[in-house]
């Protein structure tokens, strides 16, 4: 029988991996929101970046909701 202290840690319950994945998800979501807003503003030809601001704030709201949901567990 194995010694319980010699077992490998479960990767699913490792908080470092979970929060590192959350950090990459945050960067990707915010980057996608900024990129989509920038391209849409270019396409519309407006001088003020309306869609850039809207999509950035929407991405931040989604990220905050995701962080709160993940850290409650």
Image (cartoon, rainbow, N blue to C red):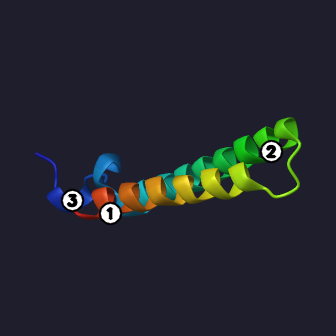
Q: Quadrant of the N terminus?
A: top left
Q: Which mark is residue 41?
A: 2
Mark 1, Cα crowd under 10 Å, few <14 / some 14-19 / many 20+, is few
* Image position of 68 (left or right of 38): left
Q: Position of residue 49 (x, y in %)?
A: 78, 56
On screen, residue 9 above or below 40 = below
**Depth-wise, is mark 1 or mark 2 nearer the camera?**
2
Q: Secondary structure at mark 2?
A: helix
| Residue 54 vertical position relative to residue 16 in the rendered view, above or below | above
CA separation, marks 2 and 3? Answer: 38 Å
Dot label at residue 34: none
| Discs 1, 3 touching: Cβ within 8 Å | no
To which quarter of the image does residue 44 belong? Answer: top right
Crowdedness of circle 2 by 10 Å Cα count: few (<14), some, many (20+)?
some
Q: Nearer the viewer, residue 60 or 47?
A: 47
Residue found 37% across the figure and 57% down from its top: 65
Mark 3 highlights which residue?
73
Residue depth check, mark 2 versus mark 3: number of the one nearer the observer: 2
Label 3 crowd (10 A; few <14 / some 14-19 / many >=20)? few
Which label's residue is closer to the chain start, 2 or 3?
Answer: 2
Q: Quadrant of the C terminus?
A: bottom left
Local SS, label 1: helix
Q: Nearer the viewer, residue 15 or 22?
A: 22
- Please name the residue that numbered disc 1 is placed on: 68
Point 25% across, 53% down: residue: 7
Q: Position of residue 51 (x, y in %)?
A: 70, 49
- Residue 17 location, x and y as percent? 44, 55
Position of 1 compared to 11: left or right? Answer: left
Q: Mark 3 falls on what kind of element?
A: loop
Q: Position of residue 30 (x, y in %)?
A: 62, 53
Disc 1/disc 3 C-alpha distance (Å): 9 Å
């Amino acid at each position: 029988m194995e010694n319980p202290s010699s077992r490998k840690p479960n990767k699913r319950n490792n908080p470092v991996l979970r929060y590192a994945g959350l950090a990459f998800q945050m960067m990707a979501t915010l980057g996608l929101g900024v990129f989509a807003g920038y391209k849409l503003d270019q396409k519309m030809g407006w001088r003020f970046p309306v869609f850039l601001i809207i999509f950035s704030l929407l991405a931040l709201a989604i990220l905050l909701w995701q962080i709160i949901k993940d850290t409650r567990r």
